Amino acid sequence: MKQTEGQIITVGVTGASGAIYAQTLLRLLEADPRVTRVYLVVTDAGLRLVSTELGIVAADARKLPSLLTGSSAQKIECLPNKDVGASIASGSVPVDAMVILPCSAGALGSIAAGTAADLLSRAADVSLKERRPLVLCLRETPLNRIHLENMLRVHDAGARLMPAMPAFYYEPKTITEMVEQFVCRVLAQIGLPQEKQYRWEGRV
Ligand SMILES: Cc1cc2nc3c(=O)[nH]c(=O)nc-3n(C[C@H](O)[C@H](O)[C@H](O)COP(=O)(O)O)c2cc1C
């Protein structure tokens, strides 16, 4: 049974394009009073994308949450991906939901195969076996048969697939707005609907 009040969320960041999505997700989680703790796991390729796309390099991984959010990031703890013995590797540790954003085709494959060879794929495996929400925001195009089969496999095991696909019907003016709206949709999937999420009103 959960001992703490508030939601505990695991965020995985892999080496797919879209580090800005992860940055936005972490900022919103840090600011959300319904969330008490965020476990962050970034793969080596994820660190490379954070550096390439955001220009952020953390010599000390513990500094990554504050560098990414631009705040003290009190709630966010960065766990080494190599540490398969970290807390979230066990189903006994209470975690309400896990989001992998962006999710590489490689990480999708590891989760679909159940390899659990690093903390990210082990934590995702735990989410599935414990029947907890697991949202995978795949970012790859075009998709080959292996990707499609892996998507179906994780879907059938209980994951929610939300490919990183921004929408245009709310007429976004900036990349920031597009990213934020996509992240709001992801958060709604794990029971954290955001005030700023655009809702279609049926206008012609
Ligand atoms: C600049 C750059 C962009 C990449 N973009 C993607 C991508 O959008 N989707 C993807 O599946 N892989 C992408 N890759 C490849 C992954 O980073 C690579 O397959 C890596 O092994 C994934 O490892 P991970 O799942 O442990 O993060 C990209 C790599 C680089 C260097």
Image: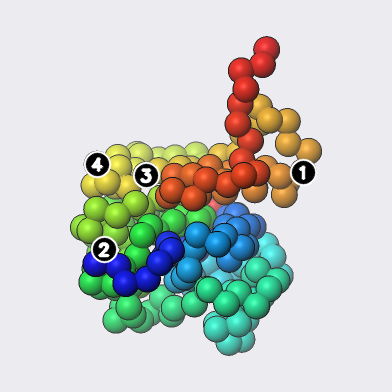
Check whether the beta carbons of the residues at disc 3 and disc 2 lie within 8 A of each other. no
**Label 1 crowd (10 A; few <14 / some 14-19 / many >=20):** few
Residues at marks 3 and 4, CA–CA distance in whole angstroms? 9 Å
Residue 174, quarter of picture: top right
Mark 4, secondary structure of its residue: helix
Q: Earlier in the sequence, mark 1 or mark 2?
A: 2
In the picture of the structure, the residue carrying the numbered disc 2 is: 126
Q: Kindly identify the amino acid type of the residue bearing the numbered disc 3.
A: Arg
Q: Tell me which residue sits at (41%, 75%) in the image.
A: 81
Residues at marks 3 and 2, CA–CA distance in whole angstroms? 15 Å
In the picture of the structure, the residue carrying the numbered disc 3 is: 160
In the picture of the structure, the residue carrying the numbered disc 1 is: 174
Q: Kindly identify the amino acid type of the residue bearing the numbered disc 4.
A: Asp
Q: Is 7 or 136 nearer to us in this picture?
A: 7
Q: Kindly identify the amino acid type of the residue bearing the numbered disc 2.
A: Val
Q: Earlier in the sequence, mark 3 or mark 1?
A: 3
Q: Is residue 5 visible?
A: yes
Q: Earlier in the sequence, mark 3 or mark 2?
A: 2
Residue 203 lies, in percent from the top left, at 66, 16
Q: Kindly identify the amino acid type of the residue bearing the numbered disc 1.
A: Thr
- Specify the label residue 156 is tagged with: 4
Mark 1, secondary structure of its residue: loop
Residues at marks 2 and 4, CA–CA distance in whole angstroms? 15 Å
Q: Mark 3: is the Cβ under 8 angstroms from ligand 1?
A: no
Residue 2 lies, in percent from the top left, at 30, 67
- Specify the label residue 203 is tagged with: none
Q: Is 28 or 175 nearer to us in this picture?
A: 28
